[in-house]
Image (cartoon, grey):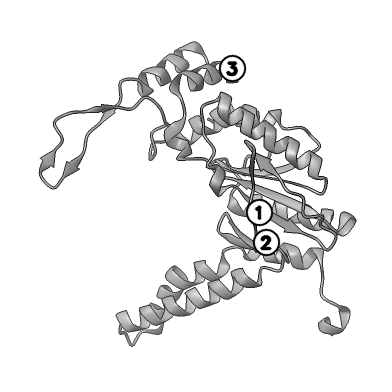
Amino acid sequence: MSDFAHKFHPLQHGFLPSRSCTTSLIHSVSIYKRILKSHKTLDIVYFDYQKAFDKVPHNLLINKLRSFGFPSIYCQWFNDFLSNRHFSVKINNYIQPTKTAIPSGVPQGSVSGPFLFLVFLNDLLYSLPSTIHFSVFADDIKVYHHNPHIVQNAINIISDWSVSNELPLAESKTSLLRLGSLNPKQLYFISNSPILASSSVRDLGLLTDSSLKFELHINQKIALSLLRAKQLLKSFRSSNPSFYSTLFKTYVLPILEYGSSVLLTLTLLNPPPSYLLN
């Protein structure tokens, strides 16, 4: 995979070295602040696919592997790996006697599954015009811009690509977040259906609201951390302080720390007034 990593779009942050949810969020939030500072308006559209990893058509995937530059012997191996797959249901000791074919999808839990999905999605990212801002983590795509016409054009491109590549969008779960004091509250459409605006959207685990202050996210994380700490204190008894320290670092601290790099980035972009630092 490392030999082909350079072929993936640089804004794809999923399943690639030195990229993560955090790098994706820092990238997008930094651009949010820059756009809002210049234009006082910004629209963000979040896309959601219907069971994306299970819907990838095998024939289209193999063709994309060839276009990606994979040697024919590798393409044949992946074709054999994906072909003639079946599943049956097991409940306790009962196993369903009939098997059902699996005509699409990349095997989840496998080493190659995420890689294959990134290959499948890669041409969509390169088809988006340079005028639109976007960030991607695996199948989580968001596009954003201050110009409504550019945003709608990107929506149309993603929608058309999804239809032609047989990877259906969950249109009812596509979300719109409006930011900025001069936002015109433009109405956007996907497949002739309006995209509903939300006051907050969970973006890669970070609850993002229209104020871009993340107060709702912080309050929820504090409440969850307190609840988790109380549950741990009820469940364990020890006279060893290091035992409780280990519990805190394992079960509570990750909740508090997630997204902290993004919040730090916001602070650096918008430092507090000098009188608060004295």
Q: Of callouts 2 and 1, which one flags the residue occurring earlier in the amino acid sequence?
A: 1
SS at circle 2? helix
Give the residue at mark 2. 262
Residue 67, disc: 3
Q: Is residue 53 above or below residue 275?
A: above
Q: Is residue 205 visible?
A: yes
Q: Which amino acid does the dot numbered 3 rest on?
A: Ser
Q: Residue furthest bottom?
A: 239
Residue for point 55% across, 58% down: 205
Distance of mark 2 from mark 3, alpha carbons? Answer: 36 Å
**Callout 1: 10 Å neighbours few (<14), some, many (20+)?**
many
Image coordinates of residue 84 in percent, x first then y, are: 30, 20
- Which quadrant of the rendered structure holds the C terminus? bottom right
Q: CA distance from mark 3 to mark 1?
A: 30 Å
Asked if residue 132 can be seen in this view, the reply is no
Residue 231's image quarter? bottom left
Q: Residue furthest top?
A: 72
Mark sitting earlier along the chain (3/1): 1
Q: Identify the residue at image location x=39%, y=38%.
A: 108
**Residue beneath label 1, please?**
25
Q: Nearer the viewer, residue 238 or 148?
A: 148
Residue 211 in the image: state x and y as whole percent: 73, 66
